[in-house]
Image (cartoon, rainbow, N blue to C red):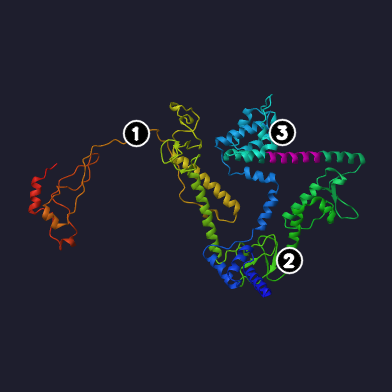
Amino acid sequence: MADNAERTKSECTAAVLDIFPDVCPDYLEQTAAKLGYNHDLVVDEIMRGIDEGEPYPKLPDQKILKRKRDAHGGDEASRARRKYDHADRHKETSSNYVQLSRKVLAQDFPRAAVKSIGKVFAEKDNLLFRTYVAIDKILRDKDLSASFEMKKTRTPTAAEYLPARLDQTILETKNPDAKRALEELRAARLFCQSEAAKSNAAAAKEREEEENFKRAEEDGTVAECGCCFGDFAMNRMVCCDNPSNEHNFCVQCARLNAENIIGLSKYQLVCMSTDGCNAGFSNSQRSLFLDDKLIAALDRIEAEDVLRMAGVENLETCPFCPFAAEYPPVEENKEFSCANPECLVVSCRLCKGETHIPKSCEEAVSENHSSARREIEEAMSAALIRKCNKCGTPFIKESGCNKMTCTRSGCGNVQCYVCAKSCDYAHFNDTSRGGKQGNCPLFDGSVNRHADDVNKAEERARKKIMDDNPDIDENLLKVDGSIKEQKGKNPAPNPAPVPRVAREPVMQRVILENAPLLQDLGNPFPYIPPPQPPAQGQPRRPQPYNGFAQPPAQNNQQRPRVGHPDDTKCQEARRHQTRP
């Protein structure tokens, strides 16, 4: 019984994986168990989710993850830089963060003048990590440190910020901005230590090569590179496989030649000598100038060339990796499921992109463009909307000065609309209110400022999308509704009020339709003349009119006339009416 259950489970899993090879194993197990391991029901459930816009969870993109690890490295120093030194970071405005950052910077660079530290800190948008790395680089470079102001006395050291105590201090810190600054300090120290170690290792390697070359000169084992014609120690060179006449090359020239060969989509490395030698390089010699990436690239190109030369019919290649397999015609199967464990991408055989079944290629492209445009629109909205630097309440200024007061109950924070700092009138350039020239403007054209911010955000978002998706059509990413700048002078601080003109009130005419009520009450409504178009530049005055508004013609046939000028009561009312 148990064997039958296991067999049913494995058959269901295999059947579903044949159709959806990239489905998440956990999701597949949960769905199959819920549906009794009936593979038809499981497939129907997955397809239903796709039709309703809820695609099934997929395996992590191992190829992308591996490429990111190769490009950035997995060490803590690289992760710290990616976290704290990216292009999307904005100027820091929190007073707790700024004050603590200045304090720890002065402690970690005790000989640097506070004025010099503050200057770099301001240039780096009050960001601790960037400032720390910049000052560390300045002090390690003799040419740069010559112009950096130093001081004679050291800054006192606070024990709680020493490396041995920093982790405990972070745990005990309650203020979130201060905690964030201390975590950034820890990352900056780690990164600078890593960079110093790399620099020291490179310097040691350079000294070792110099000493090795001196020994080779003394021993007479120096040879000329057959490519760049430089002199190198024989134990730092590679040679071709020509048994009768070996040709020596430096490691740098041999590596550069391999990179050029790969760029030409070739894989055969031959001797670079100018005398026509066609010998290659042995594996032991290749290992001296090829790293893992170059070896993998050469192997991939060779495998592709072998497959082409084999002339395999119906051969299909994964567009995301070199994996290839024999597939039926595209009319029978439009998807290619890569079996490379480092890829596993299911692609469309028509457009060579990731699978988009059941949508057509045209529908998938249109959807991608819509999603990209939506991303640009969201970036533009984020640039237009400001937020209170204390409580985070969003707001937009329509008009008035740049001294903004938060309207949220219990907050009331006052901040500058230009730089988002908490402020008072002395923060601005109005000298009559305590400010000074050169500060943020108290009044400016908000439309022009919004236009500039929104257009810059749109350009940044579009550039990012184009970098991530080079095949997308840039013309389809244009977003309508960008704010246009208003040319001309900035509005006056206190615009002149619109002059008031004495006007007589104009009352709307009343349609009288209730005849019985009118007969009982007599005509209680005073004479109300209709409004007339006013003369040019003159206040509008009502003009007398001998009549009342009438109901629609079709209703007059069924109702008695009410309010007609010939009615006795109306004539009597006019005699008693006081005319203007």
**Region rendered in magenta:** 189-206
Q: Classify mark 3: residues with Cα within 10 Å, few (<14), some (14-19) or many (20+).
A: few
Left or right: where 74 falls relative to 530 = right
Discs 3, 1 touching: Cβ within 8 Å? no
- Counting residues from the start of the chain, the first of labels 1 and 2 encountered is 2
* In-front residue for pair 71/245: 71
Location of the N terminus by quadrant is bottom right
Residue 292 in the figure: left or right of residue 160: right
> In front here: 157 or 98?
157
**Could you say where residue 444 lies in the image, as x and y percent from the top left?**
44, 36
Query: Callout 2: helix, strand or loop?
Result: helix
- Rounded to the nearest angstrom, the CA distance separating label 3 from label 1 is 60 Å
Dot 2 corresponds to which residue? Answer: 307
* Secondary-structure class at tag 1: loop
- At x 17% / y 53%, what residue is drawn? 549
Residue 265 vs 406, above or below: the answer is below
Image-based side of 478 in relation to 233, left or right: left
Question: Do the numbered discs 3 and 2 sit on residues whose CB atoms are within 8 Å?
Answer: no
Which image quarter: residue 311?
A: bottom right
Crowd class of label 2 (few under 14; some 14 to 19; many from 20; radius 10 Å):
few
Chief secondary structure of the magenta span? helix
* Residue beneath disc 3: 141
Q: Is residue 265 above or below residue 126?
A: below
Residue at x 76% of width, y 59% of height: 299
Q: Is residue 232 above or below residue 141?
A: below
For the residue carrying disc 1, how many other residues have a C-alpha within 10 Å: few (<14), some (14-19), or many (20+)?
few
**Mark 1 or mark 2, whichever is nearer to me:** 1
Q: Position of residue 266 (x, y in %)?
A: 75, 58
Residue kind at label 3, given as amino acid type: Asp
**Which residue is identified by label 1?**
496
Q: Amino acid at mark 1?
A: Ala
